[in-house]
Amino acid sequence: MTSEVSEAVFETVSVIGLGYIGLPTAAFIASRGPNVIGVDVNEKFVQRINAGEVPFYEPDFESLLSGVVAKGKLTAQTSTPAADAYIVAVPTPFKDDYAVDTKYIQAAGSKIAEQLKGGELIVLESTSPPGTTEKLAELVLAERPDLTLEQGHDNTVHFAHCPERVLPGRIMAEMSANDRVIGGVTPRAAELARDLYATFCDGELLLTNARTAEMAKLTENSFRDVNIAFANELSIIAERLDIDVWELIELANHHPRVNILQPGPGVGGHCIAVDPWFIVNAAPEEARLIRTAREVNDGKPVHVLDKVEALAGRFKAPVVAALGIAFKANIDDLRESPSLNIVDQLADHVKDVDIRVVEPNVDELPEQLTRHSNIRKQGVVEAVQDADIVLLLVDHDEFKGLDRDLLKEKIIVDTKGVWR
Ligand code: SAJ
């Protein structure tokens, strides 16, 4: 890396954690010049990435990845190398009390600490409660007391937070186009991180301190969660009042200052269903609306389950076609998926039920479902033909185009308003 003047050049960048965010980030950086070394604990992931394969589904991403791997710009390994800059994109799960578990960040920090010479930039991208990047800096400096945060020395190391904001399923467009919030533990760290992100981000790069950047990410996802909770609550109210919620929202959204989101079977994924809890945990007394929104959204799968259970009671041995188990449309990600949990619970709760699961984006059902003898995977046409009840859980494109004649005579529970 160059000395401490602006426009730092990063020859080697190491991205720690090659999941849905880390791997695309690594590939984008590699496509713009620096040599990138990706690190992941999962040996199988590493092998597949080195073969140019994407170990998960993300539209149009494979050609970018295979291109940078073929050119030797991106390699993957399980050990942490020396590098000019590090981007940490590891999971931050929460524990039972909704406090964040930073064990993966700490493990990454310790491994990075062993490699530092002074002058490096370490950027935390993982979604984290305010104060986490400062704690990462403390941990690294505790392990390497020969290094310092104080500016202008050969042994200065720089820490920043730059939360990822891409929408799974739209990563190719959003990775370079989105504006980024960059918070430095020191102002200089923020400037260096800006230089790194400028290599592959065409959006605006907005500098602040690390705590504000951490909170900005949590705030964005909580904003969305609260707004989805409004739509989900509305859907239950509309059902009670015998009103079509989809028509209702469409009409209300014609107002110039109203923009209601869409109801569904609940909120899933590893971001929106998780991040608001970090705020609730950090300020339990004050975060009343944010907590309630989480509870409303977590209550929606229970509502769907109750509804299907009541309908299934009309049959002796009901056959249910469950369409979609991913956490949202056109992806294969099953993390925190309300649809998956609904299917799992249905199998336990409904007497003599036979469930046909349709999920075009995964080859095999997860263990959570295969452990039930009354669940099997089927194609959409077969499943719907065999079913008494058709339960649409995810608005995948494949389901939108389904021949409506197949749905005649079926009891339909359409949680996404696809067939209205
Ligand atoms: N959902 C609804 N109704 C809606 C929109 C979404 O029920 O109108 C549901 C989806 O079906 C899904 C969940 O909400 O179960 C979350 O989906 P999403 O598309 O809203 O968001 P994610 O989790 O895929 O990605 C979010 C994004 N954050 C915001 O839009 C504020 C993304 O930009 C973040 O990078 C990502 O979280 C993250 O990693 O934090």
Image: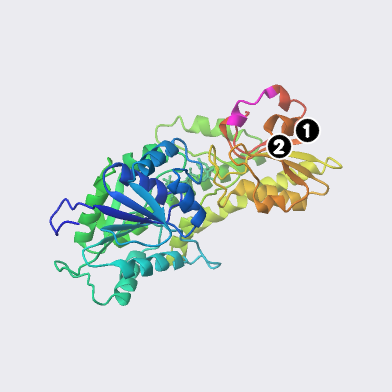
**Amino acid on which the number 2 mark rests in the picture:** Gln
Q: Residue at x 43, y 48 (%)?
A: 50
Tell me, for residue 171, which label it has, or none: none
Q: Position of residue 72 (x, y in %)?
A: 34, 45
Q: Is residue 324 above or below residue 106?
A: above
Camera-near label (2 vs 1) is: 2
Task: Tell me whether circle 2 and circle 1 mark residues in contact (CB < 8 Å).
Answer: yes
Side of 357 where 298 appears, left or right:
left
169 in magenta: no
The residue wearing badge 1 is 386
User: Which secondary structure, mark 2?
Assistant: loop
Within 10 angstroms of label 2, few (less than 14), some, or many (20 or more) residues? Answer: some
Count of numbered labels shown in the rendering: 2
Identify which amino acid the numbered label 1 is placed on: Asp
The verdict on residue 400 being magenta is: yes
* Rendered residue at 23%/66% (across/down): 157
Q: Which residues are magenta?
A: 398-404
Using the rendered view, name the quadrant where residue 28 is placed.
top left
Circle nearer the N terminus (2, 1): 2
SS label for mark 1: helix
- Taking the spot 64% from the left edge, 26% from the top edge, the residue there is 402
Measure how far apart labels 2 and 1 are at the Cα level. 10 Å
* Residue 318 in view, yes or no: yes
Residue lying farthest to the right in this orientation: 316
Of the pair 56 and 318, the residue shown nearer to us: 56
Which sits in the foreground, 364 or 234?
364
Residue 283 in view (yes/no):
no
Q: Quadrant for residue 61, please give it.
A: top left
The residue indicated by pointer 2 is 378
Viewer-proximal residue, 324 or 80? Answer: 80
